[in-house]
């Protein structure tokens, strides 16, 4: 299963995602696709995110049993802490909106 969340991305990105995944809520895409399709979708999304942001989560063979990928600039950042992916917040005055 793959979960992709988007914020303020171009319409063609949303269209590409909706061809492969369902959209149960605005900007939230969920589905079961092969690793190759998932990677191609994420490549397309991360290349075209523009001023928006996107997050992709999918199962992986690690301690947490999932991996998080992000694209775009937001205050929330994924940080590796001894092999665990944790979310940290940047300070508000960092210039990132």
Image (cartoon, rainbow, N blue to C red):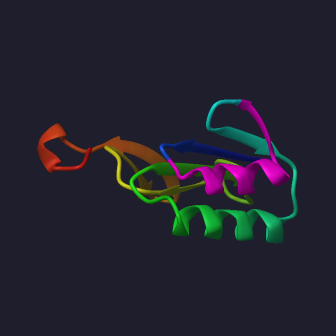
Residue drawn 87% across the image and 57% down it: 33
Q: In this view, does 24 lie to the left or right of 89?
A: right
Residue drawn 50% across the image and 58% down it: 49
What x and y, as percent, mark residue 44?
Answer: 63, 68
Is 21 a magenta residue?
yes
Q: Is residue 1 left or right of residue 7?
A: right
What x and y, as percent, mark residue 53?
Answer: 46, 50
Q: In this view, does 11 lie to the left or right of 40?
A: left
How many marks the image carries: the answer is 0
Magenta part of the protein: which range?
Answer: 9-24
Relative to 2, residue 62 above or below = below
What x and y, as percent, mark residue 45?
Answer: 60, 61
- In the rendered image, the quadrant that contains the C terminus is top left
**Nearer-the-camera pick, 3 or 58:** 3
Quadrant in which residue 67 is drawn: bottom right
Is 6 a magenta residue?
no
Inspect this view and state whether residue 59 appears. no
Magenta portion: prevailing SS class: helix
Residue extending farthest to the left is 93
Residue drawn 48% across the image and 43% down it: 8
**Nearer-the-camera pick, 16 or 3:** 16
């Amino acid at each position: 299963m793959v979960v992709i969340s988007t914020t303020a991305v171009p319409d063609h990105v949303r269209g590409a995602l909706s061809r492969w995944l369902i959209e149960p809520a605005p900007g939230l895409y969920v589905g079961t696709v092969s690793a190759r399709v998932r990677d191609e979708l994420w490549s397309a999304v991360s290349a075209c995110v523009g001023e928006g942001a996107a997050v992709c989560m999918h199962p992986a063979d690690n301690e947490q049993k999932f991996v998080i990928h992000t694209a775009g600039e937001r205050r929330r950042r994924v940080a590796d802490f001894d092999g665990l992916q944790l979310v940290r917040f940047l300070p508000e005055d960092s210039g990132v909106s």
